[in-house]
Image (cartoon, grey):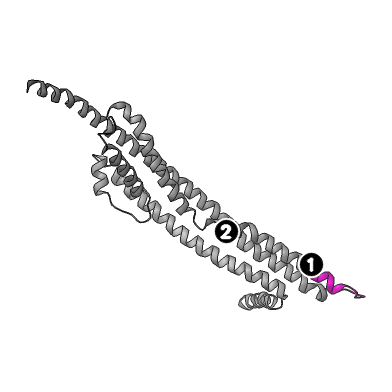
Amino acid sequence: MDSLLTTKTGGVLQVLLTTTPFAKFILLILLVFSIIAWAIIIRKWSFFRRVQRENQSFLNLFRQRSSLLNFALTAPRHEASALPALLAEAVNEWQRLTGRQHEIDLGPAAVESVMPIISEAMNRRISSELGRYENSLSFLATAGSASPFLGLLGTVWGIMKSFMDIRGLPAVNLQVVAPGIADALIVTAAGLLVAVPAVIYYNHFLGRIKDLVSTMERFSSEVASDLRAEFLRRSNRSSSSSPKRSEFELKA
């Protein structure tokens, strides 16, 4: 068994060494594609696992909050998860708007004008994080789509070489056409070996990104609901305290 495996391995290496310079060039390109693609796959796999783990940890703490604003001050910071940054973006925008009390009316009607601004700030942050998640995935798409065509180019070249080798010969045997056919088959196989993992993991990562975006959208909806409730509480306190100040001023 070991001798048979060694013979097969030696045969493949022999075919690789005896391929034409053009086939070697195609194989070199495919090798570079494969190395870069697998580096991206490993890095992205580790990154998305970390994001998922940090998101779950942050959401577990978020569900135990008593006040959104107090939680935002003490919330843990994560490097991979976008949820803390999303919360900070919303709270900073809310504080900026509510800090201009002399310019805006803190009545219930102001919620309809303030909350869309906060939602837009969170949507911008989600869009920014989406770009970070999709970084380098375009290469997987390129490798997945281009590698089969590079293999096909090698296939056509190998078949052309076989026909050129038998041109003008009175008799044709396997030894004459075998090198060209071998080039065609090995380059085709190499193209598929590069393309298949790239396409599989590209689609897998797109699914992971879709789940992460859904998580951010649900989280932003919860944050917006909490800020809307806080805004209404402040407006109610402001409206209830105004008559008391007026009454005091009349007595004075």
Picture coordinates of residue 26, whole percent (x, y)? 67, 69
Binning the other alpha carbons within 10 Å of mark 2 as few (below 14), some (14 to 19) or many (20 upward) gives many
Q: Nearer the viewer, residue 79 or 230?
A: 230
The residue that label 2 is drawn on is 198
Compared with residue 58, is residue 22 higher up or lower down, i.e. above or below? Answer: below
Compared with residue 61, is residue 184 higher up or lower down, i.e. above or below? Answer: below
Give the spatial CA distance, label 1 vs label 2.
27 Å
Task: Using the rendered view, name the quadrant where residue 146 is placed.
Answer: bottom right
Picture coordinates of residue 65, whole percent (x, y)? 26, 41
Q: Is residue 59 magenta?
A: no
The residue that label 1 is drawn on is 159
Q: Residue at x 48, y 46 (%)?
A: 210
Picture coordinates of residue 106, whole percent (x, y)? 27, 30
Task: Using the rendered view, name the quadrant where residue 246 is placed.
Answer: top left
Give the extent of the magenta segment. 161-173
Q: Is residue 24 left or right of residue 123?
A: right
